[in-house]
Image (spheres, grey):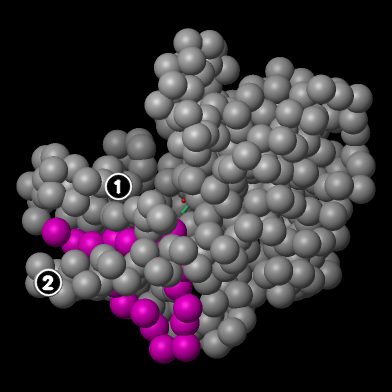
Amino acid sequence: MTIDSDDWRIAKSWLKNRKNWRTNGPIIADFENNFAKYNGSKFAYSFMGGRVALSAAIYALNIKPYEEVIVPGYTCVVVPNAFRYEKIQVKYSDIELETYGLDFKSLVKLVTPKTKAILVHHLYGLVSRDYLKIIDFAKQNKILVIEDCAQSLGASLNRLKIGNLGDIAIYSFEQSKVITTILGGMVITNNSSFAARLKEFQERSPFPNEKKIENILWNIFSRYSYYKHPLSFLMRDITRLFSNKKEVVSTPEDEINGIIPDDYGCRMPPPLAAIGINQLNKLDYYNSRRKAGALKWKQWCIDNKYKTPLVIKGSEPIYLRFPVLVEKEKKTESNWAKETLNIELGKWFLTNIHPSDEKVDNCPNSNIAVSKCINFPSILPD
Ligand SMILES: *Cc1c(COP(=O)(O)O)cnc(C)c1O
């Protein structure tokens, strides 16, 4: 949880003055420029979610209806949805179990003359095992690569931040991600013609309505008071009393079922860009804490004879979470973690296409990850 009192101070000042909530001010460009600079990328455009950033990427790459894309069969439902909203055919490839990335061998089998793009992801803050192989293969076969870096902002390979080797990459600032604006996302590219189309997409995307922005700013406060406020034990009850109507849901029921929500496709408004700038300033600090936390879980794996996630040569993961494959029962009955380690166990991806119950064919490793992959929190209390 990267929301602190400084983020709340910023949110509070915006709540006091609503004048420029929905006008295109320089603060948006500041956030995008800072992000591009941090990431070593030429162009960055902000949106109201990683999923919206993906929709912008699909437009930028000019992927047409009935063309095919290959996506990992272990992902969030909003990823295939973004393609299906445009009537693009999604094919699921299996993953490998060392970094939970797209498995090169299974992906190659799915390529047809209609394959327009491959979506590679980097989960849990790791750098995917077959990253370079897939990039090379795609280049040779003139297939575009979209990188889903929603969980791995700041991770690098040979000192280059991930997201820069493919054609276009997306990032998320949803609540569980590396940094957060409660809802938010970014798309980057180093290609100026893709950038021109991203800009065009952003310019015709509306800002969210005032109520939504207010709810999000409110959530900055409730997250802060729940987790970080010095009197959080008191604040928890107080905020719960009047926060239920203001809860921000990342993926409403309709979206899980593939129905496009009314307010899909918004760009990021100035108050959230302001929070984003502040979050970005703290990114390296939080990522260094995550890397330190990961050492504890590496030792835990060694002591308990579990495999640690693979760190590919030249890569620096940021460990958004520390994933481990354990026995099925340790995932379904997770009390042991609270009892023996005093932590809330992460159980991400309870289905292949989380959180929908859509089934995927020929993805045995994805199924294993669904039933056996747990994750530990990497930011540990001081
Ligand atoms: C969170 C996430 C997304 C979607 O990002 P939103 O900001 O929630 O739209 C996409 N892909 C992965 C791997 C994610 O973890």
User: Disc 2 or 1, which lies upstream in sequence?
Assistant: 2
Where's residue 64, x and y in %?
Answer: 65, 53
Q: Is residue 281 magenta?
A: no
Is residue 92 visible in this depiction of the protein? no
Q: Of the residues shown, which amino acid type is indicated by label 1?
A: Gly
For label 1, the SS is loop
| Label at residue 303 | 2
Query: Dot 2: within a 10 Å radius of its alpha carbon, few (fewer than 14), some, or many (20 or more) residues?
Result: few
- At horizontal 47% and vertical 78% (from top left) the residue drawn is 316
In the picture provided, is 151 more to the left or to the right than 220? left
Query: Dot 1: within a 10 Å radius of its alpha carbon, few (fewer than 14), some, or many (20 or more) residues?
Result: some
Q: Residue furthest front?
A: 230
Q: Nearer the viewer, mark 2 or mark 1?
A: 2
Seen from the viewer's position, the closer of residues 223 and 114 is 223
Q: Mark 1 highlights which residue?
A: 346
In the picture provided, is 344 more to the left or to the right than 231? left
